[in-house]
């Protein structure tokens, strides 16, 4: 066998490995392409034009919050947990932003950092309760969801407050899709995470807790870190939510607990931990938004939004379960 | 030629010593003041029945478990091995019996975990990681494992080899291996022994456990025998019969009851060209009154075969016949209705419902018979359960006590009693004597033969070839999901079973 | 000790003494809360006040009956809020406030609840999807359907009242005891009987303790799981009917508090969150304790948002007290 043939063979083997080991990611990206095509078609039928810069900008701006909290959820899902408090952290971040951020650089930067720190702290509380208190993630985060929602209402009892326009235009510029930069940053965060010791620990924990410990990995620390990251990302999502709405509402984050799980599942992450890609989750977040947009063109009442989100989640998990069952049968 | 544990210190001290080590698990004394020592440059085998305390000892020496009492010394000095990391710092590395690989990570990620090559910004360089792993595997003569593949997709033997390689590349001073060969074919065993001999020639200390006598005598310099959590002595030379007598505490002949006479009876259970995940084209016939043994290396489809006969694993082809008529078994409920019973290997997670009462565990499979309109008839249930407790001499304070309070042997009896209550005629026993003390083992053997004598049929898998050889009328040896050999009594030996099992079609190393 | 005769009869009570003790504690806790309430707010423990609190507790208790069933197998039902809300709205829109249509509307509503639960159960049991995800999705589905079909509660029939028959039944009383309470007592008796004395109850506990071993003992784990989720949906719908009968009209968001309340009641009631241990008798007492506690705090002028915080804290404290995952060797 010639040297070129060996290299060629190795290359195709590498490709098949990548495809086999990233089925979820591949499916998520394929879904994204499909959603974009469908969206373009629906837009064409409605407007006899192709979507342009305005549509791209508004889609990216509207998806940023979901990209961020979906990524936060992903960190926890990798550990085989689930963070139901995502919506509560977003509510609180949103409320704090609307009440405190004033039109000065110091206030904007200072409060943004403070709110991110608070988000991380709320995540840390979840992590400590789960990892040190040895409690079930679902129940812990359900309880803290209730607490964080209560605190958010305490901070901002009625929808209101305001976000300085400068702040909004930095995060979600209405004229240019500058928020794509943030999407890129989130993707880079995932890329670095996946190649860091922390990433190895969190993935190892999700693979098999006992085996991870036998390999000398501090699983308690890994679990706490995953929840803290989730809190941090959710707080960032809350800031984007406030910036998009230019005002605060202590309940708009509620729906994001469901949406973040939809993004994670559409992104091809395995709910039983240890497998999945954050890049897929970003795609999943965009697919979720695009579907809503497509429904909008189909003249469907926006009141049905959570119906469709729930339905897609069910369809995605059911298809996911069937696909993995099929693949298992194949591989044997 | 027994020697006591050495007590010297200084440069002549043993490489590793365990002194009066004890460890209990929920009331069961797994290790009871056992002492042990091994020198540099020697290969030291630990032998004993399942549950004799070897694995517990290895876990303590490897830093995976803490001892309740006793101490560990390295080169004469007492050390605190409170984590695998601590053991590693002292040059002690272990290949544990339960594999510690991460299934959805690649072989390379597993081989190099926590030692990954770093690139820009201290981030892990994946391309280099794969290359390093490639080099490691090739350097050890392994060509059939792709470092970029997921561990999940490897066979059990391949996983075992990755686990071994992971430790070997650390160049351990003291290497502990717990049952490293249970899933390996003969080429892989040779490969491993090559590595072991090389290490010992470089003055390292190797300690391993095995159930295969031939392997032990092939490679071990000294042998320490364990029974009931304590050591019985260390030998440089001992013949197999004497060792077995020491390990079990009785003469070999006394341990196994006589096989019941086998008449030319009609088949009770037949499988024809059964296919499914892990099982390919298995055909077998089990007759009334017969004890049919199934043997082979770990991970070669026995579990899948037993579970598919019981409806708990899917089949993709072939047929099953009960009483010479074709049946459809799609779940255990169907199987139980046809008079089939399964006693799984792990009674704690698959057999019993530990927190629930003895009574509940006994009657769970026959609830419909004990109830009217869905309401359980307490009196009926109590009588049925009580009857079985008496019949099998299950030692329990009462029917309401949670079954986890019972000893391992009595727990196993509760499981068997459940199937006697269900009046099962076909009894599938999957490695039921694992981790059971010798006395109870004997009782289970008696029970097996009496089941056969009553005209029931027993299909039984065991990881202990000795047991298969002594109890079965016939033994089927499985390899890669197929029946590779059939041996018939009289004249089955453990040696025959093992050698039929390790012969292999494809080799991972070489 | 070993000579003791085993009991001839043994309805299975796992960890009998500990469980019973735990349930007794919950009842004691309820009494303590009433006593404290009487101290800080005289008249709190008056008979009519107690009756009012128990009536409110009965709504929580009904939802928590379903929640108990699923928690006993280590599951959870997050679809409770909008199944309840949808049920309340379906009752008024299908009956249009007419007694003549009441029976039809009641059957339709209960059937809807059970069907939603059944769908949850089928996906969880047959496809192995985690219960949290499925029931959260179902909650969204019910929310979207309810909002969409009712046009955000703007439909003509949405303003209808519950049929007078239903309203009277909820508000009425028998020998001075509110009917809602009597219904709850019947449910308590029924659910307790099912759990303690039937094959279904026995299988539920078996699955909760060890699903794999139960399956290998011939228990139809999938069927039981499916039915338990259907029961949870049924009870949520029943609570919705009672609530709308109690308040007269349906509104959006009326189910929201019942998720946290039902789970808090279950946890306070000593049901082990990983399944297999606990009893509805405990949950019922848990519902009373929770509602009484919140009433005391409200009487002390606790602001509205405080309720959310209290539910969360109560759940966390009790989890820390006895919801730990057992330490593995």
Image: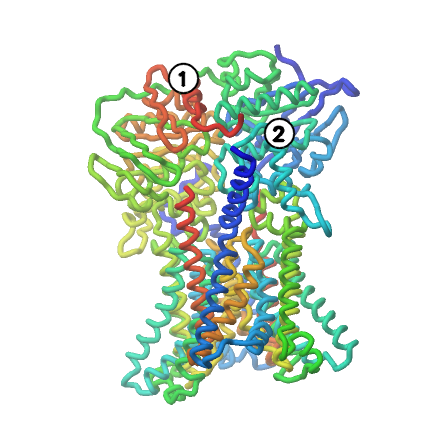
Q: Which residue is mark 1?
A: B493
Q: Is residue A41 left or right of residue A153?
A: left
Of callouts 2 and 1, the N-terminal one: 2
Q: Which residue is mark 2?
A: B139
* Residue contact at pointers 2 and 1, CB within 8 angstroms: no
Q: Is residue B325 left or right of residue C120?
A: left
Label 2 marks a residue whose chain is: B
Label 1 marks a residue whose chain is: B
Does the rendering let one see residue C202? Answer: yes
Residue C211 x %, y % = 42, 49
Residue B382 x %, y % = 34, 45
Residue B367 x %, y % = 32, 48
The residue under the point 65% across, 55% down is: A193
- Front position in the image: A60 or B474: A60
Give the distance between the C-alpha atoms of the residues marked 2 and 1, in whole angstroms.
Answer: 38 Å
Residue A127, compared with residue A9, is above or below; it is: below
- Front position in the image: C129 or A13: A13
Residue B2 x %, y % = 62, 12
């Amino acid at each position: 066998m010639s040297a070129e043939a060996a290299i060629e063979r190795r290359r195709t083997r590498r490709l098949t490995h990548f495809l086999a080991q990233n089925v979820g990611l591949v499916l998520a990206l394929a879904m994204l392409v499909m959603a974009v095509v469908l969206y373009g078609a629906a837009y064409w039928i409605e407007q006899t034009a192709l979507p342009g810069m305005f549509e791209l900008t508004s889609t990216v701006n509207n998806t940023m919050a979901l990209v961020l909290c979906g990524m936060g959820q992903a960190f926890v899902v990798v550990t085989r947990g689930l963070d139901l408090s995502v919506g509560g952290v977003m509510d609180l971040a949103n409320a704090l932003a609307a009440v405190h951020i004033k039109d000065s650089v110091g206030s904007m930067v200072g409060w943004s950092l403070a709110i991110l720190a608070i988000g991380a702290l709320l995540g840390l509380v979840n992590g400590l309760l789960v990892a040190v208190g040895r409690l079930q993630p679902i129940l812990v985060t359900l309880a803290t969801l209730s607490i964080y929602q209560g605190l958010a209402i305490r901070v901002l009892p009625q929808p209101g407050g305001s976000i300085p326009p400068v702040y909004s235009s930095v995060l979600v510029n209405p004229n240019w899709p500058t928020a794509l930069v943030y999407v890129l940053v989130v993707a880079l965060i995932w890329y670095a995470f996946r190649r860091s010791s922390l990433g190895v620990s969190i993935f190892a924990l999700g693979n098999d807790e006992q085996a991870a410990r036998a390999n000398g990995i501090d699983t308690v620390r890994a679990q706490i870190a995953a929840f803290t990251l989730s809190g941090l990302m959710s707080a960032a999502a809350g800031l984007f939510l406030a910036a998009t709405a230019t005002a605060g509402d202590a309940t708009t984050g509620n729906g994001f607990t469901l949406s973040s799980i939809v993004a994670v599942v559409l992104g091809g992450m395995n709910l039983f931990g240890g497998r999945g890609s954050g890049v897929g989750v970003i795609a999943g977040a965009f697919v979720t938004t695009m579907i809503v947009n497509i429904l909008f063109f189909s003249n469907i009442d926006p009141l049905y939004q959570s119906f469709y989100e729930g339905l897609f989640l069910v369809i995605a998990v059911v298809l996911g379960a069937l696909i993995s069952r099929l693949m298992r049968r194949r591989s044997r | 030629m027994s020697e006591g544990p050495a007590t010297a210190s200084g440069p002549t001290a043993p490489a590793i010593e365990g002194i009066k080590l004890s460890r209990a698990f929920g009331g069961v004394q797994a290790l009871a003041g056992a002492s042990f020592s091994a020198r540099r440059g020697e290969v030291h085998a630990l032998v004993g029945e399942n549950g004799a305390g070897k694995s517990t000892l290895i876990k303590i020496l490897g830093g995976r478990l803490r001892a309740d009492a006793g101490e560990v010394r390295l080169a004469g000095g007492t050390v605190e091995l409170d984590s695998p990391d601590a053991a590693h710092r002292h040059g002690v590395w272990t290949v544990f019996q339960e594999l510690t690989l991460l299934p959805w990570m690649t072989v390379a990620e597993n081989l190099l975990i926590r030692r990954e090559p770093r690139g820009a910004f201290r981030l892990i360089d994946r391309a280099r990681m794969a290359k390093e792993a490639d080099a490691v595997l090739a350097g050890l003569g392994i060509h059939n494992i792709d470092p970029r593949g997921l561990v999940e997709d490897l066979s059990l033997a391949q996983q075992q080899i990755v686990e071994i390689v992971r430790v070997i590349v650390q160049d351990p001073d003291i290497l502990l291996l717990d049952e490293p060969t249970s899933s390996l074919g003969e080429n892989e065993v040779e490969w491993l022994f090559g590595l072991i001999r090389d290490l010992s020639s470089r003055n390292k200390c190797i300690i391993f456990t095995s159930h295969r006598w031939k392997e032990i005598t092939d490679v071990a310099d000294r042998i320490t025998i364990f029974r009931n959590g304590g050591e019985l002595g260390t030998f440089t030379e001992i013949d197999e019969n004497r060792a077995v007598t020491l390990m079990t505490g009785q003469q070999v002949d006394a341990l196994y009851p006589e096989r019941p006479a086998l008449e030319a009876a009609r088949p009770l259970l037949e499988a024809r060209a059964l296919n499914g995940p892990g099982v390919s084209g298995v055909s077998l016939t089990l007759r009334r009154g017969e004890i049919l043994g199934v043997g082979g290396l770990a991970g070669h489809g026995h579990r899948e075969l037993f579970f598919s006969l019981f409806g708990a694993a899917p089949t993709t082809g072939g047929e099953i016949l009960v009483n010479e008529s074709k049946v459809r078994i799609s779940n255990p409920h169907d199987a139980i209705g046809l008079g089939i019973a399964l006693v799984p290997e792990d009674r704690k997670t698959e057999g019993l419902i530990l927190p629930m009462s003895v009574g509940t565990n006994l009657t769970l499979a026959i609830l419909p018979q004990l109830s009217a309109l869905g309401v359980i008839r307490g009196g009926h249930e109590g009588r049925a359960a009580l009857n079985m407790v008496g019949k099998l001499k299950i030692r329990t304070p009462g029917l309401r006590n949670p079954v986890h309070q019972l000893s391992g042997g009595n727990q196993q009896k509760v499981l068997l009693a459940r199937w006697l209550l269900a009046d099962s005629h076909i009894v599938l026993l999957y490695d039921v004597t694992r981790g059971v003390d010798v006395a109870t083992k004997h009782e289970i053997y008696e029970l097996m033969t009496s089941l056969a004598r009553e005209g029931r049929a027993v299909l039984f898998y065991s990881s202990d070839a000795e047991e298969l050889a002594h109890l079965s009328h016939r033994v089927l040896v499985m390899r890669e999901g197929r029946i590779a050999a059939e041996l018939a009594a009289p004249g089955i030996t453990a040696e025959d079973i093992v050698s039929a099992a390790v012969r292999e079609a494809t080799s991972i190393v070489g | 000790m070993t000579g003791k005769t085993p009991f001839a009869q043994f309805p299975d009570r796992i960890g009998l003494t500990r469980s019973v003790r735990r349930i007794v504690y919950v009842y004691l806790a309820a009494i303590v809360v009433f006593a404290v309430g009487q101290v800080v707010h005289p008249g709190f423990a008056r008979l009519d006040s107690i009756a009012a609190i128990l009536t409110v507790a009965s709504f929580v208790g009904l939802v928590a009956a379903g929640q108990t069933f699923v928690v006993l197998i280590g599951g959870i039902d997050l679809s409770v809020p909008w199944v309840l809300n949808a049920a309340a709205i379906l009752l008024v829109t299908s009956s249009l406030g007419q007694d003549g249509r009441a029976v039809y509307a009641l059957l339709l509503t209960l059937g809807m609840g059970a069907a939603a639960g059944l769908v949850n159960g089928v996906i969880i049991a047959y496809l192995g999807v985690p219960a949290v995800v499925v029931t959260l999705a179902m909650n969204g589905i019910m929310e979207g359907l309810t909002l969409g079909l009712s046009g955000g509660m703007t439909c003509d029939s949405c303003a209808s009242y519950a049929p007078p028959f239903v309203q009277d039944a909820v508000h009425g009383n028998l020998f001075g005891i509110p009917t809602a309470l009597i219904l709850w007592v019947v449910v308590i008796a029924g659910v307790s009987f099912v759990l303690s004395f039937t094959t279904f109850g026995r299988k539920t506990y078996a699955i909760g303790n060890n699903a794999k071993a139960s399956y290998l003992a011939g228990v139809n784990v999938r069927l039981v799981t499916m039915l338990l989720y259907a029961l949870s949906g049924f009870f949520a719908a029943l609570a919705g009917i009672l609530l709308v009968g109690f308040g007269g009209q349906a509104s959006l968001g009326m189910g929201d508090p019942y998720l946290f309340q039902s789970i808090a009641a279950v946890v306070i009631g000593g049901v082990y969150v990983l399944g297999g241990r606990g009893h509805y008798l405990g949950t019922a007492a848990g519902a009373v304790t929770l509602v009484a506690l919140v009433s005391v705090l409200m009487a002390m002028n606790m602001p509205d948002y405080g309720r959310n915080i209290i539910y969360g804290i109560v759940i966390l404290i009790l989890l820390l007290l006895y919801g730990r995952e057992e330490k593995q060797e």
